[in-house]
Amino acid sequence: TQLLEQSPQFLSIQEGENLTVYCNSSSVFSSLQWYRQEPGEGPVLLVTVVTGGEVKKLKRLTFQFGDARKDSSLHITAAQPGDTGLYLCAGEGNNFNKFYFGSGTKLNVKP
Amino acid sequence: DSGVTQTPKHLITATGQRVTLRCSPRSGDLSVYWYQQSLDQGLQFLIQYYNGEERAKGNILERFSAQQFPDLHSELNLSSLELGDSALYFCASSVDPGGGDEQFFGPGTRLTVL
């Protein structure tokens, strides 16, 4: 069962544009993580959000955890070709031992 | 380099066969997770071990099994392989078993079942 839904599934934009990726669920999560994965490699953690309503910034990336801890968003400002990759959100279940991954958003930033 | 190693990198085998995937966690990490990623899909959590003991189970088939050894490396055994088992298998490790702890992923093993 896929508990986390990500949208959009695919996104192709020009360098310099802004974008937002969404991660939604009907379940409450203890924490939520965002990863970026490049072809042929394992996912790399970008951020972990724990508190409802929390906002974290990582250079041009802004992450927000919903107040109810059921959803999250990732906003990228002035996207660059180096941002190209598969972005995955992962929610940690309340038993702290299971991570549920979304199906990902494949981002392509064209120069 | 995450510090997590996985072998082999690629594996090609036939239906009905059995294979073993190996993972060495980062130095100091006690927890190991196994995930399956099919083409263009997110990761499906299979199983987690912490300090040698099974901690959590996800969508792991009965044909699959895993264990974590005293030196903390882990093996994922896949038997009676089917075409649909073709996927990337990732291992991740963390210091603690949960609580928002960061997981570090290995480079994965690409399994192709013909």
Image (cartoon, coloured by chain):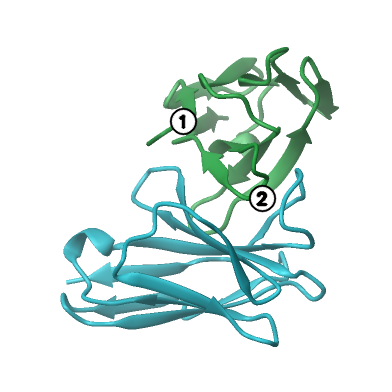
**Toward which corner of the image does residue B103 lie, by quadrant?**
bottom right
Q: State left or right for residue B92 relative to residue A54.
A: left
Residue A60 higher or lower than A106, as above or below: above
Q: Colour of chain A?
A: green
**Toward which corner of the image does residue B30 lie, by quadrant?**
bottom right
**Of marks 1 and 2, the one in the foreground:** 1
Q: State left or right for residue B95 relative to residue B16.
A: right
**Disc 1 and disc 2: Cα gap in Å?**
21 Å
Where does residue B32 sit, x and y in percent of width and height? Answer: 63, 66
Question: Which chain does the residue under circle 1 lie in?
Answer: A
Which quadrant is the C terminus of chain B positioned in?
Answer: bottom left
**Residue A3 disc label:** 1
Where does residue A30 sit, x and y in percent of width and height? Answer: 70, 33
Q: State left or right for residue A6 relative to residue A76.
A: left
Question: Which chain does the residue under circle 2 lie in?
Answer: A
Which quadrant is the N terminus of chain B positioned in?
Answer: bottom right
Instruction: Tell me which residue sits at (64%, 43%) in the image.
Output: A95
N-terminal label among 1 and 2: 1
Which residue type carries mark 2? Answer: Val
Question: Which residue is more in the foreground, A98 or B38?
Answer: A98
**Residue A44 disc label:** 2
Where does residue B100 sit, x and y in percent of width and height? Answer: 75, 43
Residue density around tag 2, few if under 14, some if 14–19, many if 20 or more, within 10 Å: many
Which residue type carries mark 1? Answer: Leu
Chain coloured cyan here = B
